[in-house]
Amino acid sequence: MTALTVEQVVAAHKANIETLFGLTNKAFEGVEKIVELNLTASKAALSEAAGHTQSVLSVKDVQELLALQSSLFQPLAEKAAAYSRHLYDIASVTGAEFTKAAEDQAAEAQSKFSNLVDSASKNAPAGSEALVAVMKSSVSAANNALESVQKAVKQATEAAEANYNAVATSATAATKQATAKKR
């Protein structure tokens, strides 16, 4: 069996630190996007509130006030849905980057472990072929299980995203219909 050298340990630590800093930067980018989204939404809401206040102050009768109030609900629901969608997109992209990094790390670890098993099997003493075969079979089974889990997670994520999109579309359509009926 081969032992790890100091250079290999240092290289592994360096790669892990680079991955950590890369993921930390991605997390901060996600937070920056959320802060930017919130600032933009807050500015728009403040501007719309000022405009709405001016409109309410210029109302002449109750019917005009009711028409003004009902005209606000549809855009509000659409904006809330758009905000939710932007927030979901930011979280989704950031999560995908973390998932990719984790998959890359897992693939690299699998490769290193497979190489270690291959190296050990080449240097195994005579008569240990059955043990080596069991070891290789176990590694292969573990790799297959990990790939199956990764595929299942991807499918579940895609299904959740499709369901989210369907619910968001339905909610927006229902709000439009409800607002149209009030008019």
Image (spheres, helix red, strand yellow):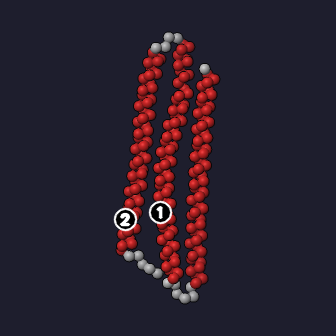
Label 1, on which residue?
105
**SS for callout 1:** helix
Residue 46 quadrant? top left
Q: Which mark is residue 14?
A: 2
Q: Are marks 1 and 2 in contact (CB under 8 Å)?
A: no
**Label 2 environment density (alpha carbons within 10 Å; few <14, some 14–19, many ≥20):** few
Residue 168's x, y, as percent? 58, 38
Q: Is residue 79 left or right of residue 183?
A: left
Residue 38 quadrant? top left
Write the residue at 53% across / 21% down.
Answer: 69
Q: As shown in the figure, which amino acid type bears the numbered disc 1?
A: Gln
Q: Is residue 144 above or below residue 87?
A: below
Write the residue at 52% across / 73% down.
Answer: 114
Residue 35's x, y, as percent? 41, 40
Q: As shown in the figure, which amino acid type bears the numbered disc 2?
A: Lys
Write the residue at 47% across / 50% down.
Answer: 94
Residue 169 quadrant? top right
State the count of labels: 2
Q: Is residue 62 above or below residue 72?
A: above
**Mark sitting earlier along the chain (1/2):** 2
**SS for callout 2:** helix
Q: Which mark is residue 136?
A: none
**Label 1 environment density (alpha carbons within 10 Å; few <14, some 14–19, many ≥20):** some
Residue 11's x, y, as percent? 38, 68
Q: Is residue 84 above or below residue 30?
A: above
